[in-house]
Image (spheres, rainbow, N blue to C red):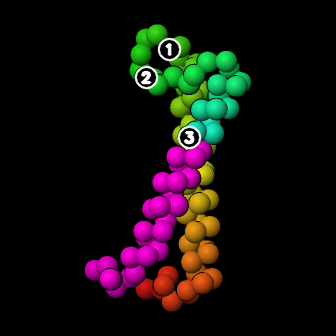
């Protein structure tokens, strides 16, 4: 099954699944670490006036950077592994 530009779907699908899994795992790990470090659950509604600005910004930065770094590393690792096993799958 090929995409319109002639590339394979497998690398795209593998990247999506790896990114999704990395995001899920990293969000759970960050929530656990935040709870252990602060003694409170991370804020869920960052716009709520009940959440302090520092706490909202802190969680936004930690979660945003952490999740995105994990996603990028997972996608790159998955694609690199796919390229080692099937180099022609990534050429298009």
Along the line of sight, the residue nearer the viewer: 92 or 11: 11
Question: Where residue 82 sits in the image (x, y, percent)?
Answer: 57, 78
Alpha carbon separation for disc pair 2 and 1: 8 Å
- Does the segment drawn in magenta span residue 23? yes
Q: Residue at x 32, y 83 (%)?
A: 1
Examine the rendering and report whether any part of residue 68 can be seen: no
From the viewer's perspective, tell me whether residue 11 is left or right of residue 34.
left
Q: Dot 2, crowdedness within 10 Å: few (<14), some or many (≥20)?
A: few
3 vs 1, front mark = 3
Residue hosting label 2? 45
For residue 65, above or below residue 35? below
State which tag comes first along the sequence, 2 or 1.
2
Alpha carbon separation for disc pair 3 and 2: 15 Å
Residue hosting label 1? 51
Along the line of sight, the residue nearer the viewer: 66 or 18: 18
Range of the magenta residues? 1-26
Alpha carbon separation for disc pair 3 and 1: 19 Å
Question: Going by the picture, which residue comes out furthest to the left?
Answer: 4
């Amino acid at each position: 099954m090929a995409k319109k530009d002639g590339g394979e779907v497998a690398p795209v699908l593998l990247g999506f699944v790896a990114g999704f899994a990395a995001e899920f795992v990293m969000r759970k790990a960050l929530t656990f670490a935040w709870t252990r470090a602060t003694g409170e659950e991370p804020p869920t509604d960052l716009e709520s006036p009940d959440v302090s600005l520092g706490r909202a910004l802190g969680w936004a930065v930690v979660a945003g950077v952490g999740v995105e770094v994990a996603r990028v590393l997972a996608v790159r690792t998955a694609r690199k592994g796919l390229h080692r096993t099937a180099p022609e799958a990534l050429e298009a």
